[in-house]
Image (cartoon, rainbow, N blue to C red):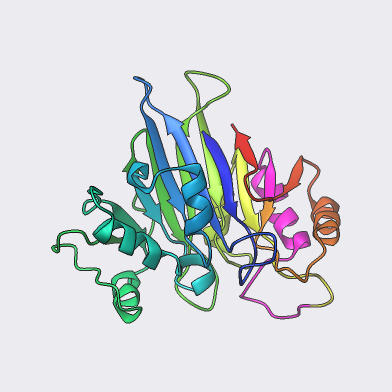
């Protein structure tokens, strides 16, 4: 599998990056490329189009419905309905229970029976869905709104014939659901919006230290830190993470790719 960072700015679009969005891709046994978009936060639909034609997206999964993770779903809805020649009415959008209602509240229809609209599919705890050869399983995580992490199993792009595990934390603090998502991951994409000693709130976001602790306990093989707000110094977050996790750690950057 290959993960490409579309946007990684936390809580809002920043001067160097859109808000959260990630492109996970892999090929099946006959060489067909499958593409899963994880989150479409504010500002993300533009840079996504530099990486893939929207018609080539096979599914979208939204970790939760805060605008920095879902606002640009409206852009995708407009594209799907009005782009001449675009046939996207069967494109599944997996997400929280209120996803369709949220789209309608933003004045875009989400009726799965209307031609040109997106087909919204609510997550079910621990119930997998398939995107080509990738099997994704959602688990509830700890955030002030309904939020989900995703564990995706798919073909290993480095060692043919084997499988890889990709884990996406969404927005969360430490919790049992995150433990399930991250266990044994080949690549763990984990948020680290808060900083130790500065952000005392619990049940909202991870710090770099807590992200490292999760990765270490999960025995994740590689970590990518994301969702850092523009006012954070990435070097500080990286240092916190390395205090608790001895494996390779990267800080997400737009257009960076990871193959595993």
Residue 158 visible to the viewer:
yes
Q: Nearer the viewer, residue 218 or 240?
A: 240
| Residue 102: quadrant of the picture | bottom left
What residue is shown at x 74% (from left), y 54% (from top)?
212
Does 171 appear above or below 215?
A: below
Number of numbered discs overlaid on the protein picture: 0
What residue is shown at x 27% (from left), y 62% (from top)?
120
User: Residue 6: x, y in percent?
Assistant: 56, 51
User: Residue 131: x, y in percent?
Assistant: 34, 41
Residue 209 magenta-highlighted:
yes
What residue is shown at x 61% (from left), y 50% (from top)?
189
User: Residue 158: x, y in percent?
Assistant: 58, 23
| Residue 174: quadrant of the picture | bottom right
- Answer with left or right where residue 148 lies relative to residue 11: left
Q: Nearer the viewer, residue 258 or 97?
A: 258
Does 104 appear above or below 44?
A: below
Q: Nearer the viewer, residue 47 or 220?
A: 47
Does 110 appear above or below 49?
A: below
The magenta stretch spans which residues? 199-224
Residue 144 magenta-highlighted:
no
Q: Outermost residue, front direction?
A: 84
- Answer with left or right where residue 199 lies relative to residue 88: right
Residue 119 visible to the viewer:
no
User: Residue 51: x, y in percent?
Assistant: 50, 43
What residue is shown at x 74% (from left), y 46% (from top)?
250
Q: Quadrant of the C terminus?
A: top right
Does 81 appear above or below 222?
A: below
């Amino acid at each position: 599998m290959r993960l490409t960072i579309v946007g990684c700015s936390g809580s809002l679009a920043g001067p160097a990056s859109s808000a959260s969005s990630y492109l996970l891709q892999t090929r099946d046994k006959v060489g067909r490329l499958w593409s899963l978009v994880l989150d479409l936060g504010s500002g993300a639909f533009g840079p996504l189009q530099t990486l893939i034609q929207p018609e080539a997206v096979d599914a979208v999964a939204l970790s939760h419905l805060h605008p920095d993770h879902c606002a640009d779903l409206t852009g995708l809805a407009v594209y799907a309905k009005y782009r001449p020649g675009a046939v996207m009415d069967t494109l599944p959008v997996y997400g929280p229970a209120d996803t369709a209602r949220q789209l309608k509240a933003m004045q875009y229809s989400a009726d799965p029976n209307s031609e040109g609209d997106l087909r919204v599919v609510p997550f079910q705890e621990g119930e997998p869905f398939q995107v080509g050869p990738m099997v994704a399983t959602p688990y509830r995580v700890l955030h002030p709104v309904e939020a989900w992490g995703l564990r995706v199993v798919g073909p290993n792009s480095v060692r043919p014939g084997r499988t890889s595990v990709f884990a996406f934390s969404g927005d969360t603090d430490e919790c049992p659901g995150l433990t399930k998502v991250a266990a044994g991951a080949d690549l763990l994409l984990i948020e680290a919006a808060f900083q130790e000693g500065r952000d005392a709130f619990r049940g909202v976001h991870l710090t770099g230290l807590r992200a490292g602790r999760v990765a270490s306990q999960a025995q994740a093989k590689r970590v990518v830190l994301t969702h850092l707000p523009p006012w954070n110094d990435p070097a500080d977050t990286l240092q916190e993470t390395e205090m608790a996790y001895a494996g390779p750690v990267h800080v997400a950057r737009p257009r960076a790719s990871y193959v595993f």
